[in-house]
Image (cartoon, helix red, strand yellow):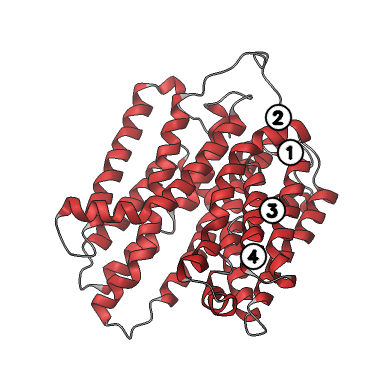
Amino acid sequence: MKNPNNVLQTVGVLSISLMLPSSQAINGVIPQMKEALNISQSQSELLGTAPSITVILFILLSSYVADKLGMRKTIIIGLLLAGIGGILPVFVANFPIVLISRIILGAGLGLYNSLAVTYISALYTGNARASLLGMRSSMEAIGQTVLIFLAGILVNISWTASFSVYALAFPIALLFALRVPEVKIEKSESGSVKEKMNPAVYALVLFAILLVMNSIAISVRFSSIVTEINGSAFNASNYLALMPILGIAAGFIFGAVNRTFGNKTMYLGIGFFILSNVFIAMSSGNMVLLLLGLFLSSIPGAWYFPFIFSNLDRITTKNTVNLATSLIFIGCNIGNFIAPIAMSFTQMITGSNELTAPFYVFAVLFILVLLVTIFANQKRPQERIKQDI
């Protein structure tokens, strides 16, 4: 462990996660962009989603770049790319330039996405690592909330001014460069031999896909269900705005939860998600059940991913931990992308027109996930992840 009590070092390590969800920060100004640039609806939506393409590509490349340049330099370069790409429309505003800027933004974010987790795992151990990974999850939610809020204020100046929120990447890069030391992931003695990835990693990738897919499905469909209950005049956005706040709180208490429940933290998170889906599935005409389901759904992700990442080095080798982290983040992006498709598919399975019907399928799916997880841990107790005390 290197300087674990250095406050600025810890702030520097955590602050890089503030920018990771920033590609969504300007989604609220898409209508103004469409009008100002005189582009089609599909072109305007492309500007919102373009970063996700390069995020996935550069997540795959990040391990290779980090091996060549070092993790610290790779993170700094990623932040600088995100900042430069992000603010470019402030100075030049036409469709090709804005599209290129969004692609550069995604490249920068993808370049250090998985390294934000790997860096914590390299610098810290045990309970300190688990607590900081929980806080890192909260930092993403804080970043998303703050950047969207600031972009909403700046749009009153001009739609291009909203892109100046990405300038936050520059002081973060400076703090990281000045206060956070380089770390090296030690290679095992078999480093010259190509190692196979532990199949458990692919199970975690599938789990990440399912979790994010279900979370996005809940947030997307919530407003429509609310409208059915309270009418089209009812504003559901205030409830959705509470979700990041609850996620932030859940992330900050992850360390205490993990110390208390250990391996059962995973079971607890899955249990919350099952309850969330059941409440939403049964909420037709019942606002209380719907809100319970919505708020419960904001907790599991803040516990699952810190738990997985804090223990990932126990099911991978030193040579494959970076790639394993990258694959899990790619799974998250895939889950985000396929959520609308999954909603349509589960609606078809149920044969119901009820907006809440797919959540019965999701509840059953996560019950199966819980049973498989329990069975796997009981079958191979010697491979269980044990919490550091």
* 180 and 169: which is toward the camera: 169
Q: Which residue is mark 2?
A: 185
* As drawn, 213 above or below 188: below
* As drawn, 38 above or below 289: below
Looking at the image, residue 96 sits to the left or right of residue 27; the answer is: right
* Residue plotted at (71% across, 38% down): 123
Looking at marks 3 and 1 on the same chain, the residue that comes earlier in the sequence is marked by: 3
What label sits on residue 71 in the rendered view?
1
Looking at marks 2 and 4 on the same chain, the residue that comes earlier in the sequence is marked by: 4
Residue 252 in view of the camera: no
Looking at marks 3 and 2 on the same chain, the residue that comes earlier in the sequence is marked by: 3
Q: CA distance from mark 2 to mark 4?
A: 37 Å
Q: CA distance from mark 3 to mark 2?
A: 19 Å
Q: Which residue is mark 4?
A: 98
Q: CA distance from mark 1 to mark 2?
A: 9 Å
Q: Which residue is mark 3?
A: 16
